[in-house]
């Protein structure tokens, strides 16, 4: 696969970022692994990708195969971490909305004179907030 076909332009800026197809990355990593006598920069130049990017792909491949440094995250673990972080952000946002709604709700209820306390006592509630905070 030719790099131009494998790359998808992500940004319209002058220093365009590219994302490469998974198949192209796999082929590039296989070429690096099968050519121990050639350096990554040479292979990257041949493929038309940045040497840093190709080194990163090869390093992540080693990690995914269990040959990476201790504590390094595999691709699956990285994806799961991204998903959990997104989910946590959504939960925090929802919680913030609920807290604000609860604060707004309690500002307008259970204050003497608006019938709030009397209404709650009818349901068996003994204590009632009697002042604004």
Image (cartoon, rainbow, N blue to C red):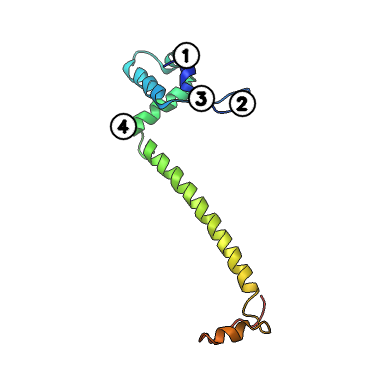
Q: Which residue is mark 1?
A: 45
The residue located at (61%, 70%) in the rendering is 105
Q: CA distance from mark 4 to mark 3?
A: 27 Å
Observer-side mark, 4 or 3, equals 3
Q: Earlier in the sequence, mark 1 or mark 2?
A: 2
Q: Which mark is residue 65?
A: 4
Q: CA distance from mark 2 to mark 3?
A: 11 Å
Q: Secondary structure at mark 3?
A: strand
Picture layout, residue 93 above or below residue 56:
below
Along the line of sight, the residue nearer the viewer: 59 or 113: 113
Is residue 36 left or right of 98 when viewed as pictured? Answer: left
**Is residue 85 visible in the rendered structure shown here?**
yes
x, y percent for residue 100: 60, 64
Q: Which residue is mark 2?
A: 12
Answer whether labels 1 and 4 touch (C-beta < 8 Å): no
Observer-side mark, 1 or 2, equals 2
């Amino acid at each position: 696969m030719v790099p131009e076909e494998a790359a998808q332009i992500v940004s319209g800026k002058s220093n365009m970022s590219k994302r490469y197809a998974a198949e192209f990355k796999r082929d590039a990593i296989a070429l690096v692994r099968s050519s121990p006598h050639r350096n990554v920069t040479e292979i990257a130049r041949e493929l038309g990708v940045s040497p840093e990017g190709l080194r990163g792909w090869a390093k992540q491949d080693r990690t995914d195969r269990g040959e990476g440094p201790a504590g390094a995250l595999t691709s699956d673990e990285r994806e799961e971490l991204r998903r959990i972080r997104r989910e946590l952000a959504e939960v925090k946002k929802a919680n913030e909305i609920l807290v604000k709604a609860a604060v707004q709700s309690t500002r307008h209820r259970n204050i003497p004179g608006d019938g709030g306390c009397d209404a709650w006592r009818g349901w068996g509630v003994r204590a009632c907030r009697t002042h604004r905070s």
